[in-house]
Amino acid sequence: MPPGLLRGLADARLAPAIRQMHRHLSRPWTVAQLAKSAALSRSAFFDRFSHTVGLAPMEYLLGWRMAVARGLLRGRELSIHEVAERVGYSSASTFTTAFSRHVGQSPGRYARAS
């Protein structure tokens, strides 16, 4: 099986950490916290996650947050500040910067184009 989310969820050690990221998206996760939920050291968790999923843990988390944010912005029911909070950002400006880098356009422009 190639690296990816399904392979990560099939890994008994990584699955709890991935589920935690998905269930508690707004939590300010650290590699140490995720490693603890996987019952691994930080370095072992980082290596295993990167090899199994194909992305570093925080890179995966950023991608997941941005995917959820895109869906929320398409719905046009929430303000950018509310979307930012739901996907784990303490300020709309920090979220806007991260979203713009990841998606290639601002959240407002993305929402208008959807």
Image (tube, rainbow, N blue to C red):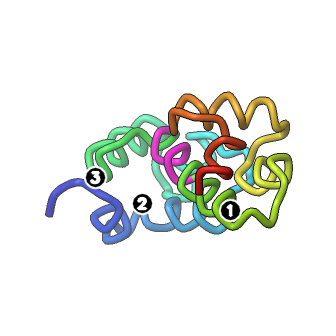
Residue type, numbered disc 1: Leu
As displayed, is residue 92 above or below residue 68?
above
Say left or right for 83 vs 10. right
Q: Position of residue 17 (x, y in %)?
A: 52, 59
Q: Position of residue 24 (x, y in %)?
A: 69, 62
Alpha-carbon neighbours of circle 2 within 10 Å: few (<14), some, or many (≥20)?
A: many
Label 1's element?
helix
For disc 1, the marked residue is 72
What residue is rendered at 36% in x and 42% in y?
55
Label 2's element?
helix
For disc 2, the marked residue is 14
Q: In the figure, residue 100 lies in which quadrant?
A: top right
Residue type, numbered disc 2: Leu
Majority SS type along the magenta span: helix
Cβ–Cβ below 8 Å for labels 3 and 2? yes
Query: Sequence order check: which comes first, mark 3 or mark 2?
Result: 2
Q: CA distance from mark 1 to mark 2?
A: 27 Å
Residue type, numbered disc 3: Thr
